[in-house]
Image: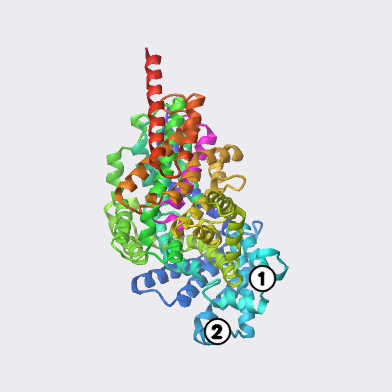
């Protein structure tokens, strides 16, 4: 943890397990802490789940319904055994009804695994058992999602089911003929359009392995290494602790699937560092929240949404990683400059050298932890499937861990712990994917996606900026309180087709929806990442929320830029790509300086207004706009240089 010396300069402790302490406490607050034979049973199921996914990664995935059936059986059983029905229930033992729920879910999955040949032959003619089991599975999926992530996503799923059942009672474009329960339940249960649809399929094939990879990295001390590396790289620069938070959150975001988990893991170190160096509590929490949220759009993992996006768009996963790189870099660059300009405005002191991790020592002790991540990216670039890439990266991590410090080596005990933690860590994502499948099923069977597209087109009168604003608002609302994976599935399925009909490339439309769904985590009143960081910073949650919203302002600009400027997605000739990227980085620098009110020195009201307006004026790419941007920034730069010289004199 963070300690203080006599000069109140922050230090980083050397304990390899401290970096995950806050995250573990957060998980403990939601899950049971079992002992004795119940713990060994849960651990055995978790280990079996991890070994199953490692086996299929090495020898090939099973046919879709079998892979997804086994995956959801493991995840669903773990969910009901680990997550109590309410916060008030005892957490040291499993309630009798939770045993019943777990057994019923296993029966529903085993029915598919054992009888799939017969089920597939009678498609369209469900039996009574199909209907009963379908209703049971729908209820279990909704209840499991409620336990693991709260009410927002289950409420959307319940509303979707009501919409499917009572279609004739909805007005206008939303109305449809309706589907009785005897048709809806088997559709959701026995087709790859419902519970066992694409989202759960991606969870079963890709996401679980990446979560497992993150668990192995965590066991090997990667969390502390990332933070030490960030502090060593930035600690002595202006605003060093804040910049360390940005880098640490970005690094953790490459393997983390949750902005909240990212915030509490990195925030446990970086928020105290920022506070002790002079940042206000609200700003310290805001920076960590904004940067941690950005981890959900940072390749290669992107909060697991990248895998689903690749499936939806029918493109190679590596294409998603490459195209998303520049927008994510712009987002993190903007937060970096927010920190830089804020520290300049309030005149923060720098770290003293003796209380900073030494870069050479940090790299010497933890260089091996970078190899698996580099290997993962290289394998993806060479065309390996994500499954194979993450499997061999995980194997490499275990091997190279023995070249580092003794306490970071992947001993058999650490490997077993990682297998258990990886499976348990994947439960919430699997629950989100299964529940999202219910919503996707309703969208498919009712055609509401087309109705939503017609609604957006009608309300915007075919004017693209209006349609983008409507999609932004809808994505933020749908993303509030919903995990990254689920919110992307919902928003992209509903909103992306409308944008595509107006000429927006489908990839840009999907990424646009992802960005604004993710930004719900820093958008009050439901700003989960902000509230998590606020708890560590001991700051006012709402003040921290609005500060985080301002700090993440570039996140509201960048999606509009890549919709109008596809060169930011690295599509087009190299000259236009370079020009587009340079213009974009100038825009985020200007926006950051304008919001913080500081550039080389304090901005006056005219300079500040120019810097805030300028980025929005160059959303649409044109040579005139680019020249205007360069001119304005150059003029302000020269004026500030002159003022600084006069001040010195």
Q: Residue furthest top?
A: 649
Q: Residue furthest right?
A: 169
In the drawing, does residue 360 fall left or right of residue 87? left
Task: Residue 144: give x, y in percent of width and height.
Answer: 59, 65
Disc 2 crowd rating (10 Å Cα; few below 14, some 14-19, many 20+) is few
State which region is magenta.
278-305
Task: Residue 70: give x, y in percent of width and height.
Answer: 48, 74
The N terminus lies in which quarter of the figure?
top left
The C terminus lies in which quarter of the figure?
top left
- Where does label 2 land, which residue? 123
Q: Mark yes or no: residue 103 visible.
A: no
Separation of marks 1 and 2 at Cα, in angstroms: 23 Å
- Check residue 176 in the rendering and tell me which mark sits there, or answer none: 1
Callout in the foreground (1, 2): 1
Image-quadrant location for residue 100:
bottom right
Residue 280 covered by magenta stretch: yes
Question: Which of pointers 1 and 2 lies earlier in the amino acid sequence?
Answer: 2
Residue 7 covered by magenta stretch: no
Q: Are marks 1 and 2 in contact (CB under 8 Å)?
A: no
Disc 1 crowd rating (10 Å Cα; few below 14, some 14-19, many 20+) is some
């Amino acid at each position: 943890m963070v300690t203080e010396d006599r000069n109140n300069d922050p230090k980083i402790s050397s304990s390899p397990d401290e970096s995950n302490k806050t995250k573990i406490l957060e998980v403990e607050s939601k899950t049971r802490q079992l002992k004795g034979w119940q713990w060994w049973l849960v651990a055995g199921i978790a280990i079996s789940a991890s070994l199953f996914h490692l086996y299929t990664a090495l020898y090939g995935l099973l046919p879709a319904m079998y892979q997804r059936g086994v995956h959801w059986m493991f995840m669903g059983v773990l969910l009901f055994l680990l997550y109590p029905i309410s916060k008030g229930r005892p957490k040291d033992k499993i309630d009798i009804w939770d045993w019943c729920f777990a057994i019923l879910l296993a029966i529903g999955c085993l029915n598919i695994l054992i009888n799939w040949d017969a089920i597939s032959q009678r498609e369209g003619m469900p039996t009574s058992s199909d209907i009963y089991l379908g209703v049971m599975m729908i209820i279990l999926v909704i209840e499991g999602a409620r336990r693991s992530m709260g009410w927002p996503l289950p409420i959307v799923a319940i509303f979707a089911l009501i919409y499917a059942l009572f279609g004739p009672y909805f007005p206008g474009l939303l109305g449809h003929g309706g589907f009785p329960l005897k048709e809806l339940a088997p559709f959701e249960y026995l087709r790859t359009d419902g519970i066992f649809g694409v989202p759960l399929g991606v969870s079963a094939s890709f996401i679980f392995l990446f979560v497992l990879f993150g668990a192995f990295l965590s066991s090997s001390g990667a969390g502390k290494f990332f933070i030490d590396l960030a502090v060593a790289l930035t600690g002595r620069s202006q605003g060093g602790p804040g910049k360390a938070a940005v880098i640490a959150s970005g690094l953790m975001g490459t393997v983390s699937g949750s902005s909240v988990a990212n915030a509490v893991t990195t925030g446990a170190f970086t928020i105290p560092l920022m506070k002790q160096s002079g940042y206000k509590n609200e700003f310290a929490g805001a920076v960590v929240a904004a940067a941690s949220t950005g981890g959900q759009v940072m390749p290669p993992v992107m909060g697991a949404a990248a895998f689903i996006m690749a499936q939806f768009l029918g493109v190679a996963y590596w294409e998603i990683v490459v195209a998303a790189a520049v927008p994510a870099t712009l987002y993190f660059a903007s937060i970096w400059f927010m920190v830089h300009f804020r520290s300049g405005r309030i005149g923060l002191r720098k770290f003293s050298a003796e209380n900073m991790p030494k870069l050479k020592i940090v790299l010497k002790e933890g260089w091996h932890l970078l190899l698996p991540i580099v290997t993962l990216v290289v394998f993806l670039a060479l065309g390996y499937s994500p499954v194979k890439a993450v499997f061999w990266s995980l194997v490499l991590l275990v091997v190279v861990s023995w070249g580092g410090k003794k306490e970071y080596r992947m001993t058999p005990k650490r490997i077993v712990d990682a297998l258990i933690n990886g499976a348990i860590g994947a439960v919430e994502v699997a629950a989100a994917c299964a529940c999202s499948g219910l919503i996707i099923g309703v969208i498919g069977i009712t055609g509401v996606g087309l109705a939503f597209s017609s609604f957006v087109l009608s309300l915007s009168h075919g004017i693209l900026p209006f349609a983008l604003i409507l999609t932004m608002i809808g994505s933020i609302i749908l993303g509030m309180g919903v995990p990254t994976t689920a919110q992307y599935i919902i928003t992209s399925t509903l909103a992306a087709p409308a944008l595509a009909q107006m000429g927006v490339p489908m990839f840009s439309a999907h990424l646009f929806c992802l960005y604004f769904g993710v930004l719900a985590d820093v958008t009050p009143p439901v700003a989960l990442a902000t509230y998590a960081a606020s708890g560590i910073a001991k700051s006012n949650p709402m003040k921290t929320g609005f500060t985080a919203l301002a700090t993440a302002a570039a996140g509201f600009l960048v999606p509009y830029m890549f919709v109008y400027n596809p060169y930011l997605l690295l599509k087009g000739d190299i000259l236009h790509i370079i020009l587009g990227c340079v213009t974009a980085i100038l825009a985020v620098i200007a926006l950051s300086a304008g919001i913080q009110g500081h550039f080389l020195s304090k901005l006056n009201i005219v300079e500040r207004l120019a810097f805030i307006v300028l980025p929005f004026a160059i959303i649409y790419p044109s040579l005139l706009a680019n020249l205007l941007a360069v001119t304005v920034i150059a003029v302000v730069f020269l004026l500030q240089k002159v003022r600084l010289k006069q001040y010195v004199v």
